Image (cartoon, rainbow, N blue to C red):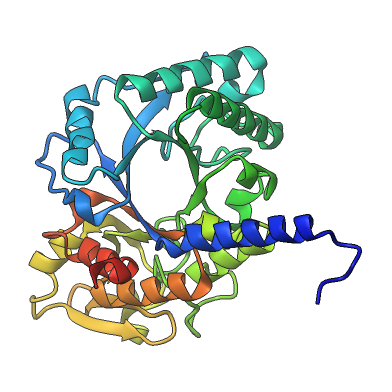
């Protein structure tokens, strides 16, 4: 029985709001895939995704957004044409990426924000897109040798709020998406959470690259949970999600990021089959496709599984090389984690690094299982 000081109309409105939120999530978690422009052939089964983020547009020093000469507009048009196979597929233009600068200048003044908003919305309409994704790595930080300022934190909030207002005005008969890519901890200190969440449809967490050239040891670059061998400062997907939840971001606005690639380490100390050991050279990245065709069936490479981190790794004792990556088994576990936590879905980087859509199939079937029945 409800308390008399609450009117029936108020309770009905609250119930309707809860029902709407529940219904929106019950539509099933989303699958979001980044597609980076490339002349290489693109295999993309549109019916397996909800959203495609096309990467990347860039920002000029005056704040305006543009497609660089390296991006062929025809390839963006080809991605948009995938709607013929999946009319509900949404195509979003991603702006930025690691090392992409001029965001600080673009957010710093009313005039620059206006140029950013006008030009990005113009590109959205030119290519008949469904929204914009801002990938500023990272506000207030200059780790990627980009311009930055302590004022970035608030200025980014204002930019997002003004961009959200413009998209709402542009979409009087529809809803245009506005999303960002982000990471936890120090990388998120330049974000006014949860205020910016009010302007965003969701946040794509870059829960990968936890270990690499900037870390002192090898490790799981996209581990779900913490391994006992990891240092307390070691990053995990669970910790990253908790950071954003604790900051007040709604669970259904958080997408877990997964890599379709591995991180490689060389000159690794042998204990624990190369896991959480010092290394002398960092070999960069290797696609899942190359892992499948050059590592998994190669007798020089041992396959291992971390029961705590819930991810695999490869070890080559002869060459003292280690590879951290995700595979179908680890992605299936992450899918269950997303559903159990009521999160928004899964984002992945990047489509061309898959092998015959093996990894995408795991995400599609796991997150859209109810639709397949």
Q: Indicate the quadrant where residue 316 lies.
A: bottom left
Q: In this view, does 226 lie above or below 123?
A: below
Residue at image position (24%, 68%) is: 372
State the image coordinates of residue 140 (x, y, percent, origin top left). 63, 38
Furthest residue in direction front, as rendered? 8
Q: Indicate the quadrant where residue 93 lies.
A: top left
319 or 219: nearer the eye? 219
Q: In which quadrant is the C terminus drawn? A: bottom left
Residue at image position (51%, 31%) is: 146
147 or 321: nearer the eye? 147
State the image coordinates of residue 342 (x, y, percent, origin top left). 51, 69
State the image coordinates of residue 355 (x, y, percent, origin top left). 13, 60
State the image coordinates of residue 241 (x, y, percent, origin top left). 55, 64
Q: Is residue 279 above or below residue 58?
A: below
Q: How many numbered marks, from 0 up? A: 0
Residue at image position (68%, 64%) is: 246
Residue at image position (56%, 57%) is: 20
133 or 314: nearer the eye? 133
Residue 324: tell me if it is visible: no
Q: In which quadrant is the N terminus drawn? A: bottom right
Q: In this view, does 141 lie to the left or right of 293?
A: right
Furthest residue in direction right, as rendered? 5
Q: In this view, does 96 lie above or below 327?
A: above
Q: In this view, does 192 lie to the left or right of 353?
A: right
Q: Is residue 262 above or below residue 161?
A: below
Residue 329: tell me if it is visible: yes
């Amino acid at each position: 029985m409800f308390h008399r000081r609450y009117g029936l109309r108020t309770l009905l409105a609250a119930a309707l709001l809860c029902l709407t939120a529940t219904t929106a999530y019950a539509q099933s978690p989303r699958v979001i895939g980044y597609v980076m422009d490339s002349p290489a052939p693109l295999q993309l089964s549109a019916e397996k995704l909800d959203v495609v983020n096309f990467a990347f547009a860039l920002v000029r020093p005056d704040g305006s957004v543009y497609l660089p000469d390296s991006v062929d507009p025809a390839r963006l048009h080809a991605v948009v044409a995938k709607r013929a196979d999946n009319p509900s597929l949404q195509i979003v233009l991603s702006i930025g990426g690691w090392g992409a600068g001029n965001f600080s200048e673009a957010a710093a003044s009313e005039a620059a924000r206006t140029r950013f908003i006008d030009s990005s919305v113009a590109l959205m309409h030119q290519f008949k897109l469904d929204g914009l994704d801002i990938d500023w790595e990272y506000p207030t930080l200059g780790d990627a040798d980009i311009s930055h300022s302590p004022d970035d934190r608030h200025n980014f909030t204002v930019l997002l709020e003004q961009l959200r207002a413009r998209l709402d005005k542009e979409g009087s008969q529809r809803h245009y998406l506005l999303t960002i890519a982000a990471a936890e901890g120090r990388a998120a200190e330049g974000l006014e959470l949860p205020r910016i969440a009010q302007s965003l449809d969701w946040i794509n967490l870059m829960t990968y690259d936890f270990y690499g050239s900037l870390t002192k040891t090898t490790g799981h670059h996209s581990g779900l949970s913490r391994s006992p061998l990891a240092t307390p400062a070691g990053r995990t997907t669970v910790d990253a999600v908790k950071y954003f939840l604790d900051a007040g971001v709604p669970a259904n606005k958080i997408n877990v990021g997964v890599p379709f690639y591995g991180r490689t380490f060389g000159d690794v100390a042998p204990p624990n089959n190369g896991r959480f050991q010092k290394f002398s050279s960092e070999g960069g990245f290797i696609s899942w496709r190359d892992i499948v065709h050059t590592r998994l069936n190669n007798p020089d490479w041992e396959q291992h599984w971390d029961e705590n981190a819930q991810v695999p790794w490869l070890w080559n004792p002869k060459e003292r090389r280690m590879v951290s990556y995700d595979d179908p088994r680890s992605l299936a576990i992450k899918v269950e984690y997303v559903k159990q936590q009521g999160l928004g879905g899964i984002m992945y980087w990047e489509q061309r690094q898959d092998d015959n859509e093996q990894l995408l199939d795991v995400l599609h079937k796991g997150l859209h299982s109810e639709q397949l029945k």
